[in-house]
Amino acid sequence: MAKDLNKINKKLAEAAGSINPTDDQMAQFAKMVGKYKNRSMEEIEAEVNQMMGTFTRAQKDDFIRKLQMLKQMQGLLDKNQMKKVDMFIRLLSQ
C-alpha cells in the first residue's frame, strides 16, 4: 500500500508542476480522488449538501483552496472528475 501511495505522490508531484503541495496535501488529494471517482454527481452533491452545515467558513475556504489546487494539476483528473471538483467548489462557495 505504501508503495502505491508513493507512486500516487510521484504522479501528483509531476502533475503539480510549480504548485509544490506538501506530502500531506498530496495524500489528501489522492484520498479525495479515490473516494469520489466512482460516485455519480447526484450522490456527491447529496453528500456535500449534507456536510455543508458542519463546515465553518474557514473550513469551506480551505477545502475550496485545496480543490482549486487539485484542478491545476493537469493530467491528474479526467473530464468527469473535473466536473465533480467544479461542483464541489460551487457548493462550498455558497
Image (cartoon, rainbow, N blue to C red):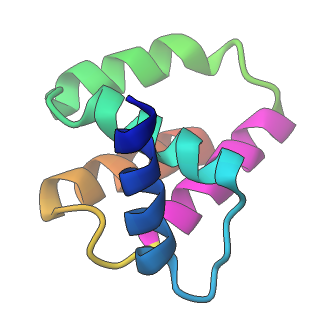
Pinpoint residue 48: horizontal percent, then vertical percent: 46, 23
Residue 94 in view here: no
Quarter of the image with the C terminus is top right
Question: Could you say which quadrant of the image residue 5 lies in?
Answer: top left
Residue lying farthest bottom?
18
Pinpoint residue 3: horizontal percent, then vertical percent: 39, 41
**Is 34 left, or right, of 55 in this rendering?**
left
Question: Could you say which quadrant of the image residue 2 lies in?
Answer: top left
75 vs 46, nearest the viewer: 75
Residue lying farthest front?
3
Residue shown at the point (66%, 14%) measured from the top left: 53
Stretch of the chain drawn in magenta: 58-71
The secondary structure that dominates the magenta segment is: helix
Residue shown at the point (31%, 34%) measured from the top left: 34
Residue shown at the point (61%, 48%) measured from the top left: 93
| Magenta stretch contains residue 9 | no
Figure label count: 0
Pinpoint residue 26: horizontal percent, then vertical percent: 57, 53
**Is 31 left, or right, of 69 in this rendering?**
left
| Magenta stretch contains residue 68 | yes
Residue 29 in view here: yes
Check the image and report above or below for 42 versus 79: above
Quarter of the image with the N terminus is top left
65 vs 26, nearest the viewer: 26
Residue shown at the point (64%, 79%) measured from the top left: 19
Check the image and report above or below for 93 versus 43: below
Check the image and report above or below for 81 versus 5: below
Pinpoint residue 62: horizontal percent, then vertical percent: 75, 47
